[in-house]
Amino acid sequence: MVVVSPIYDYVDMHGINVIRAWLDQQERKAKAKLNARLNVLEQRNRTEWAKFNVEVLKGDKDGLVAIKVLYLGTQYRLIGYDGPNRGEFTLLVCGREQNNKYIPLNVGRQAFERIAEVNANPVGRKIHHDFG
Amino acid sequence: MISDKERQIRDSLANREYREALAIEHVNTTLAIQIRMMRENHQWKQSDLAARLGKHQETVSQWENPDYGRHSMTTLKALAAAFDVALLVKFIPFSELVQDMVNLSEIRLSPPSFGEEQYLASTSVAVTSNLMEDVIFINANSQDLVFHYNPPNILDTVKVGKEPVHA
């Protein structure tokens, strides 16, 4: 199995994988597309991700990374960061982008709060991405 | 041994709608990546590839977008000819899809052109791995394992060290 840039999911204080929980709420075909994209990204060097609609955000989301996936007119956004350890990428919040605005609107604040939680407890607050 | 990821993907296939979508998205995404990687390994700009195929640069840009997903057979055949690689389209069981999904190695995504294969055949011995069906190239003199990374005019080979070979 090829894993070059391991992708992790944020786990909340109750031990819930919130990324998996969010994916489970999406339309099945959308979830399939998002997981297919994550599967490919995990097998490519992180430095190449920009070629696959992955963008480092600026402004109030400075340093966060958005994996951008279009499915049937909906612009999905999987927000994460490079960490907590070198070579790792952790998904923090999932949402959509509409009219140049992220939904939920507090996605940046939420993401930064979660980064602090993951950095404080890298073992307990992240788990390898669940492709199920 | 089966990995957690492989098991998760296999389990997810139980839902028909999901597995159909996953198969389509895997094809769409890997096609886009393959086109981009092969073009870059040939050191061609999008406009170079477009010119070879009589298309606009914007069209190549679309083909390389993982969200595009509308590649036609005609386009794929033309791309195979441009890159001098074979195009193989066939129906497979989902178990094979899972294997492909978790083994997107460099050589699978950007296969050597015919000319590169010929060059390697003249300087190396090719051995097929029983794990991934990838072709592994071994330097005939040193017996070191080598993988081939394209640029076609440079015909570069990169050593990855001495490893046991599954013949």
Image (cartoon, coloured by chain):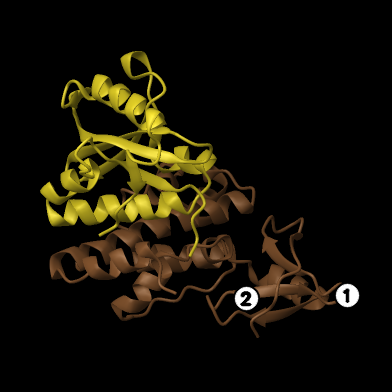
Chain colours: A yellow, B brown
Q: Is residue B135 left or right of residue B154?
A: left
Amino acid at pointer 1: Asn
Circle 2: element type: strand
Q: Which residue is mark 1?
A: B141
Amino acid at pointer 2: Val
Viewport quadrant of the C terminus of chain B: bottom right
Is B100 above or below relative to A44?
A: below
Residue A69 image label: none
Q: Identify the residue at the far top of this view.
A: A59
Provide the chain ID for the residue under circle 2.
B
Residue A17, horizontal then vertical, whole percent: 23, 45
* Residue displayed at 32% across by 14% down: A60
* Residue displayed at 33% across by 19% down: A61
Q: Which residue is mark 2?
A: B135
Which quarter of the figure has residue B28? Answer: bottom left
Q: Residues within 10 Å of mark 1 (few under 14, many from 20)?
A: few
| Tag 1–tag 2 contact (CB < 8 Å) | no
